[in-house]
Image: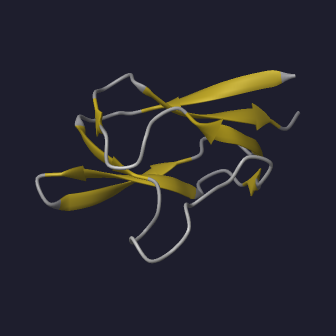
């Protein structure tokens, strides 16, 4: 079993859903596709997607919604599909 930690590439504020009225992008146990958006980072009023690098099973977020993040900080973990 290989666990991939998705890290922030930029400093900013993390959003775990596309808007406050909808659920989070992913819940533990959800399937994840390579290139799929799993969070957004707000940088200077621009929202940039955080995408899964590889397919697998979503294990969970490592940060709270609307928390500040720094480059290299863990956002979530994915169990990679072999």
Q: Please give left or right for residue 61 compared with residue 42 in the image.
A: right
| Residue at the (65%, 39%) spot, across then down | 60
| Residue at the (39%, 24%) spot, across then down | 73
Q: Position of residue 6 (x, y in %)?
A: 54, 33
Q: Position of residue 63 (x, y in %)?
A: 45, 35
Q: 49 or 69: which is nearer to us?
A: 69
Question: How many numbered discs sit on the rendered protein?
Answer: 0
Q: Position of residue 42 (x, y in %)?
A: 24, 53
Image quadrant occupied by the C terminus: top right
Q: Quadrant of residue 15?
A: bottom left
Query: Residue most toward the bottom?
Result: 21
Query: Residue most toward the left?
Result: 44
Image quadrant occupied by the N terminus: top right
| Residue at the (60%, 58%) spot, across then down | 36
Q: Please give left or right for residue 2 compared with residue 67 in the image.
A: right
Q: Please give left or right for residue 29 compared with residue 82 in the image.
A: left
Q: Quadrant of residue 31?
A: bottom right
Q: Position of residue 29 (x, y in %)?
A: 80, 48
In the image, residue 53 above or below residue 51: above
């Amino acid at each position: 079993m290989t666990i991939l930690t998705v890290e922030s590439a930029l400093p900013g504020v993390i959003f775990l859903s596309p808007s406050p009225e909808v659920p989070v992008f992913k819940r533990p146990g959800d399937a994840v596709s390579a290139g799929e958006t799993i969070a957004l980072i707000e940088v200077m009023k621009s929202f940039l997607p955080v995408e899964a690098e590889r397919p697998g099973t979503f294990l969970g977020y490592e940060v709270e919604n609307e928390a500040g993040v720094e480059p290299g900080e863990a956002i979530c973990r994915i169990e990679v599909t072999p």
